[in-house]
């Protein structure tokens, strides 16, 4: 079914996430069953995921109590990245 196909696309896109704890994918489809956007949880396009932190907790050794040293303020949900990556109106 189309639903199974689009779920598979979302699952496959989730595998692109570099998040060490969780991977999510999203697929936006129009009324004619055409994929118009795909995304996964991670940094938005243009932000290097090699430079920004992947730590999940500011209380971790790496976070050292500073929220800006964690992924939380930088990582976008898969759905947001799918919208940002959409290819048509």
Image (spheres, grey):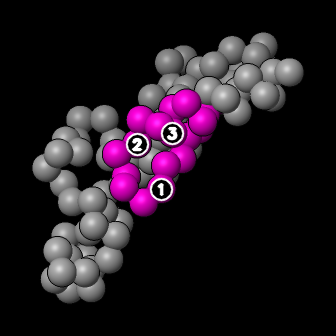
Question: Nearest the camera: 65 or 29?
Answer: 65
Q: CA distance from mark 2 to mark 3?
A: 6 Å
- Relative to residue 56, is residue 7 drawn left or right? right
Q: Residue at x 54, y 17 (%)?
A: 88
> Pointer 2 and pointer 3: residues touching (CB < 8 Å)?
yes
Choose the circle earlier in sequence order: 1 or 3: 3
Q: CA distance from mark 1 to mark 2?
A: 8 Å
Q: Secondary structure at mark 1?
A: loop
Give the numbered dot on residue 17.
2
Q: Label 3: which residue?
A: 14
| Quarter of the figure with the C terminus | top right
Give the numbered dot on residue 22.
1
Choose the circle earlier in sequence order: 1 or 2: 2
**Magenta region:** 10-27
Question: Magenta segment: does it hold 52?
Answer: no
Residue 82 sits above or below residue 42 on the image: above
Q: Residue at x 73, y 23 (%)?
A: 5
């Amino acid at each position: 079914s189309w639903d199974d196909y689009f779920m598979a696309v979302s699952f496959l896109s989730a595998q692109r996430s570099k998040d060490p704890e969780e991977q999510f994918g999203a697929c936006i489809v129009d009324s004619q069953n055409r994929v118009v956007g795909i995304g996964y949880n991670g940094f938005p396009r243009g932000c290097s995921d090699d430079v920004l932190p992947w730590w999940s907790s500011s209380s971790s050794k790496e976070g050292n109590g500073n929220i800006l040293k964690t992924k939380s303020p930088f990582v976008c949900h898969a759905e947001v990245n799918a919208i940002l990556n959409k290819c048509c109106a």
